[in-house]
Amino acid sequence: MATAIICVLGPAPVADAESLADWLRGEPALAARVRLSGAAPAEGHLGAPLDTVSVLLGAGGPLTVLASCLRAWITQPRRSDVKLTVRHEHGPAVEIDARRVGREDVAEILRQALEERPERDG
């Protein structure tokens, strides 16, 4: 099962990641598939900020639901300075910018970023 890894870039990435995770958990098709995570703690720190949202994806529906939820969340007026980087656990990242989301097809961007890629050996 693939995982979408979503990093929130903006003035308050931790708060925005928490908000996004809560938003996604409000969607029944995604509720049990969402978790917050963060990078490894920096030296001398006890923990790391939870600024990344991971969503487990299955076949079919969840990708479409995720695209719809991301579009709705990022287009809220208070999110105008937010950008999301979305990637498959084994792939390159794509960026969704709140300022351009009206002109972008979020579902198509997500399909490009999250399409299944064959596992590489070694």
Image: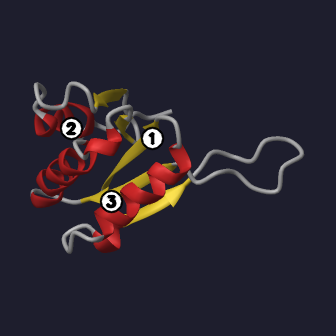
Question: What amino acid is at disc 3?
Answer: Leu
Q: Which mark is residue 94?
A: none
Query: Which mark is first along the chain, 2 or 3?
Result: 3
Residue 86 image position (x, y, % from top left): 35, 37
Give the vertical position of 61 relative to 49 (above or below). Answer: below
Between 115 and 51, the residue placed more toward the observer is 51
Q: Which mark is residue 56?
A: 3
Residue 23 image position (x, y, % from top left): 31, 62
Between 6 and 97, the residue placed more toward the observer is 97
**Residue 119 falls left or right of residue 115:** right
Question: What amino acid is at disc 2?
Answer: Leu
Query: Which mark is first along the chain, 1 or 3?
Result: 1
C-alpha span from label 3 to label 2: 14 Å
Residue plotted at (33% across, 59% down): 56
Question: What amino acid is at disc 1?
Answer: Cys
Residue 102 image position (x, y, % from top left): 12, 31
**Residue 49 falls left or right of residue 118:** right
Q: Mark 1 sits on what residue?
A: 7
Residue plotted at (50% across, 59% down): 36
Q: Which of marks 2 and 1 is in front?
A: 1
C-alpha span from label 2 to label 1: 13 Å
C-alpha span from label 3 to label 1: 15 Å
Q: How crowded is mark 1: few (under 14 residues within 10 Å), some or many (20 or more)?
A: many
Q: Element type at marker 2?
A: helix
